[in-house]
Amino acid sequence: MSQDQPGDHLSIRISNEDRERVAQILHNAMAEGRLEMAELEERLDQVYAAKTFGDLEPITRDLPVQSTSPAPQPPRMPQAVPSPLPSGRIVPGATVGPRNSVAVMSGVERKGEWVVPEQHNAIAVMGGVELNLTYARFEAAETVISCFAFMGGIEIYVPDDIYVVVDGFGFMGAFEDKSMGQPAPGRPVVRINGFAMMGAVEVKPPKRKHLRDADRYEIEE
């Protein structure tokens, strides 16, 4: 009976969860002063372009972390992907907006009818990032927004027809989830994670002025 050769697992394709685990390692390394901002952005691009454990392994090779290429796990049963909403919130194959929102002693704002990529990074260093999803559309049924706030703030406005899962860590800072959306078939899911140090990541309903044209997303017959 044949045995697996050393390194065979490096050719196994990775999941979004694997990518997010490595992205969190990189965000922590920057907070500790091990990486500079330019290095973080460059490595995050590599993470989200990675296809296999072999692609991920070199990205954290010089950081004091456990290997990013663990032994392969038993395959998970495939899960059904929700159908797109009739209103067109989910638009696979559309031209997506920027994959990074970086504010260093400055401000960045994303709003209007932009298409949110499947993976988006929001970084605020002594600055502010505002992501307004009120009229946004999505490349995929499930989107991940990774946040890093250092002495800065990230505000994410989410209407109630989007379900949000917030899983972040604050050190002398905070992650706040005031969103109102509930899970439902076909409804986009946005997972927000990351790290806030002497800063804040706030997830909240849209401002009243953002909702004046809310009927543009009524379900079409």
Image: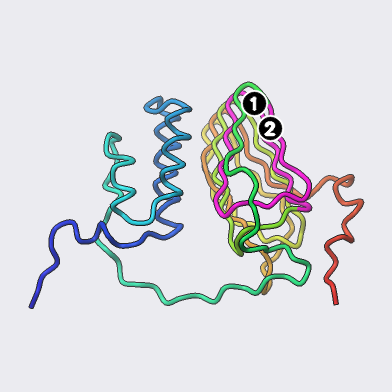
Query: Where 11 falls versus 157 (above or below)?
Result: below
Quadrant of residue 218 within the rendered picture: bottom right
In the rendered structure, the answer to whether residue 183 lies left or right of residue 65 reads right
For the point 77% across and 51% down, the residue is 113
Query: Where 184 falls versus 49 (above or below)?
Result: below
For the point 14% across and 67% down, the residue is 4
Quadrant housing the C terminus? bottom right
**Contact between labelled residues 1 and 2, with CB atoms less than 8 Å apart:** yes
Q: Position of residue 85 (x, y in %)?
A: 73, 70
In the rendered structure, the answer to whether residue 152 lies left or right of residue 24 reads right
For the point 42% across and 60% down, the residue is 15
**Residue extent of the magenta highlight:** 107-135
Dot 2 falls on a residue whose secondary structure is: strand
Dot 1 falls on a residue whose secondary structure is: loop
Q: Please tell me how crowded label 1 is: few (under 14), some (14-19), or many (20+) other residues with Cα within 10 Å.
A: many
Magenta region's main secondary structure? strand
Q: Position of residue 29 (x, y in %)?
A: 39, 33
Q: How many marks?
A: 2
Query: Where 141 falls versus 117 (above or below)?
Result: below
Q: Please tell me how crowded label 2 is: few (under 14), some (14-19), or many (20+) other residues with Cα within 10 Å.
A: some
Q: Position of residue 75 (x, y in %)?
A: 35, 72
Query: Where 37 falls versus 195 (above or below)?
Result: above
Q: Which mark is residue 108?
A: 2
In the rendered structure, the answer to whether residue 211 lies left or right of residue 115 reads right
Q: Is residue 109 shown in magenta?
A: yes
Q: Which mark is residue 53?
A: none
Quadrant housing the N terminus? bottom left
Pointer 1 residue: 127
Amino acid type assigned to the residue bearing label 2 in the image: Val
Q: Is residue 48 shown in magenta?
A: no
Amino acid type assigned to the residue bearing label 1 in the image: Gly
